[in-house]
Image (cartoon, grey):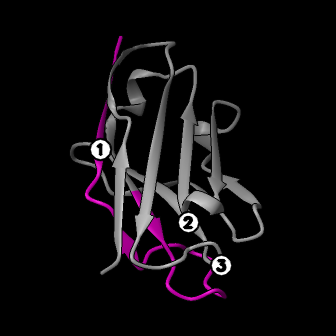
């Protein structure tokens, strides 16, 4: 059974930092693209960052220069370092992974989400 489990969310003041983790189990994701999405109340889910199996990264314009996605294939884990947090970063953050090695968009497997709240 494939599982993606996020951790590291919480309440932080504007300007602060958080580090999210996504621990995968049930299969090896080292050959798959993985990514972080977020959904704020009343808004659609959006892709925040994704990392290819080769380690190439893409970010949403709203988080460029502040967020960094990385992965540790030996631990089957992906991370999202979030710095200079803003109130508008408040959302539920989801980890996702692709099923096939050639998939570019990671959206086949999903975690349960972790709440990030940034107070202004």
* Sequence-first tag of 3 and 1: 3
Residue depicted at x 34% and y 56%: 5
Looking at the picture, tell me which residue is in the foreground, 7 or 96.
7
The picture quadrant where one finds residue 118 is top left
* Sequence-first tag of 2 and 1: 2
Q: Point out residue 93 in the picture as x, y percentages from the top left corner.
A: 36, 47
Q: Is mark 3 on a helix, strand or loop?
A: loop
Check residue 31 in the rendering and tell me which mark sits there, or answer none. Answer: 3
Is 86 in the magenta?
Answer: no
Looking at the picture, tell me which residue is in the foreground, 82 or 77.
77
13 to the left or right of 70: left
Frontmost of labels 3 and 1 is: 3
Check residue 34 in the rendering and tell me which mark sits there, or answer none. Answer: 2
Instruction: Pick out the residue farthest to the front.
Output: 74
Point out the stretch of residues depicted in magenta.
95-120
Q: Point out residue 97 in the picture as x, y percentages from the top left corner.
A: 48, 71
User: Label 3, label 1: how many angstroms apart (C-alpha)?
Assistant: 25 Å
104 to the left or right of 78: right
User: Label 2, label 3: how many angstroms apart (C-alpha)?
Assistant: 9 Å
Q: In this view, does 100 lie above or below 104?
A: below
> For the C terminus, which image quadrant?
top left
Check residue 114 in the rendering and tell me which mark sits there, or answer none. Answer: 1
Q: Is mark 2 on a helix, strand or loop?
A: strand
């Amino acid at each position: 059974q494939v599982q993606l489990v996020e951790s590291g969310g919480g309440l932080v003041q504007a300007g602060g930092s958080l580090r999210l983790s996504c621990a995968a189990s049930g299969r090896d994701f080292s050959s798959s693209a993985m990514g972080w999405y977020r959904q704020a109340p009343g808004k659609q889910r959006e892709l925040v960052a994704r990392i290819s199996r080769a380690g190439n990264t893409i970010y949403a314009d709203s988080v460029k220069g502040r967020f960094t996605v990385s992965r540790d294939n030996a631990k089957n884990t992906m991370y999202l370092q979030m710095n200079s947090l803003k109130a508008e970063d408040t959302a539920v953050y989801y980890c996702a992974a692709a099923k096939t090695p050639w998939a570019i968009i990671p959206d086949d497997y999903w975690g349960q989400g972790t709440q990030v709240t940034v107070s202004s």
